[in-house]
Image (spheres, rainbow, N blue to C red):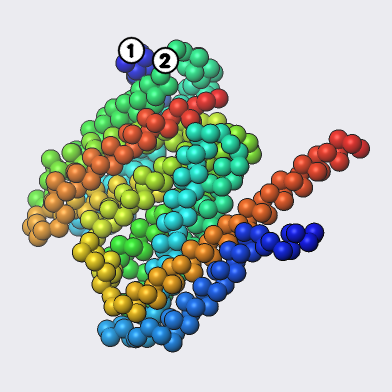
Amino acid sequence: MNGSHRARPDRATAAATAAALLMALALAMIFFYVPTDVSEGYSQRIFYFHVPIALTTYFLFTWGAVNGARFLLKRDMSLDLKSYVPMHLGVIFGSLTLVTGSIWANIAWGTWWFWGDTQLTTFLIIFLFNCAYFMLRFSVEPGERRARYSAVYALLGVGLIPLSVLAVRIAQDALHPIVFRSNGVNMDGSMFLTFLVALAAMLSLAVSMYLVEMRGKRVDERMAQLRRLARGAA
Amino acid sequence: MRAYRALLRKDLLLELRGRELVPAMVVFVVGALVLVRLGLGGERLAGGTRAATGLLWVVVVFTSMLALVRSFAQEREHGIWDGLLSAPADRSAIWAARASATFLFLGVTQAVALPLFWLFFLQDGRSPSLAVLAAALALADLGVAMLGALLAGLVSNVRAREVLLPVLFLPFALPLVSVAVRMTVDSIPPQNGGLGALHGLGFLALYDTIFALLGWALFEYVVED
């Protein structure tokens, strides 16, 4: 590693540092700053984890689908990787959403899973969609065709996600606390500020994980190239 | 449009002569309805008409998978793909013709399934509105056929395609079924509000519109090779 590299930290390190700082700030605000919710008590604080994680998952899927569409238009293989990595991270954040949502359901309603809850059910559909994306991706040999099929399926998810939100909302009785209404935000200033910091922390964590995973994938690719070259020379 | 008509004619003629798909779907749907009836208790219907109506939709989804799994099978097995792709026609005509054929096959199967459903489950005078059920089935079939044609094209060159297609399709069936079940179950008297038929049908029409647009736009990328 040369001197100039040390002097200018790369994007992954910068994003990881920002994520660590924001996460520490968010945790401090969640446990020591924000007032306790009157109706749900101390355990309502899981809201500051659950909702930012859920929004980050939506963000990751949108990011994956946008890069999928860009791949179909430009046919640049690096865009395939940029579509796959957010989808992969989406599974991690999606699983966390289901786990934190289930914990919250148990605290608020005394049951680990409630089918009447719109958000949990929607997330389950999206989670299944994501698992199917991976089944498809790993059934096709690496290459242009795999990239194309993955991009098409990711774009179908753009249709599925709003439809699932709508379907579950109109087909079930609303029980999930609706914090964001069309006429404004249903929480006080300090709670909203804490929520925004927690959301920024989750988003920057996702971005830093994306940059680290992209770097790993590029190293893998280079290693594979070197192995091919070494085999050719021998 | 000419290409679409020719391709649809080809699909219908192949089915008419070979009788490969529709008879199997009809036998499957009859078997599945008997299975559901026995599953809900041979003599006394457990869960009543509401449970039966919900399960009818599960049977509909599984039956449609039979049609989707065999989509493009002829093209693959007899090397028709190359001919279709080299034809100087819009490739989305292949998708539209396949979706239309699947829609018709599903319609024929359900024309058999609905009277049987009535016979097996709805003898106690309490039944979902048949008009609502038929309209919901028609719109749901349309969505399934359009999305299914795209997914069938997607897996037609993939190994383990018969296993993969249901896995890819199921997440998309979930919003459709959740609204359709609620809508048809809520039409069973005595109706105490619930999801109105117009709201439900509006959702199904939206579902069809979204997947019509996505199918039409994306099919070209699915069949490049």
Look at the picture and state if B75 lies above or below A80. Answer: above
| Secondary-structure class at tag 2 | loop
Q: Quadrant of the N terminus of chain A?
A: bottom right
**Residue A98 in sight in this render:** no
Q: Position of residue B123 (x, y in %)?
A: 14, 48
Label 1 is placed on what type of residue? Arg
Residue named by callout 1:
B2
Task: Look at 28% across and 56% down and name the residue there.
Answer: A168
Along the line of sight, which residue is nearer the eye, A94 or A171? A94
Along the line of sight, which residue is nearer the eye, A79 or A141? A79
Q: Residues within 10 Å of mark 2 (few under 14, many from 20)?
A: some
| Secondary-structure class at tag 1 | helix
Look at the picture and state if A176 lies above or below B140. Answer: below
Query: Extreme right residue here?
Result: A234
Is residue A14 left or right of A156 when viewed as pictured? Answer: right
Task: Look at 52% across and 64% down and name the residue there.
Answer: A204
The answer for which chain carries disc 1 is: B
- Separation (CA) of disc 1 from disc 2: 9 Å
**Residue B199 in sight in this render:** yes
Q: Position of residue B81 (x, y in %)?
A: 51, 20
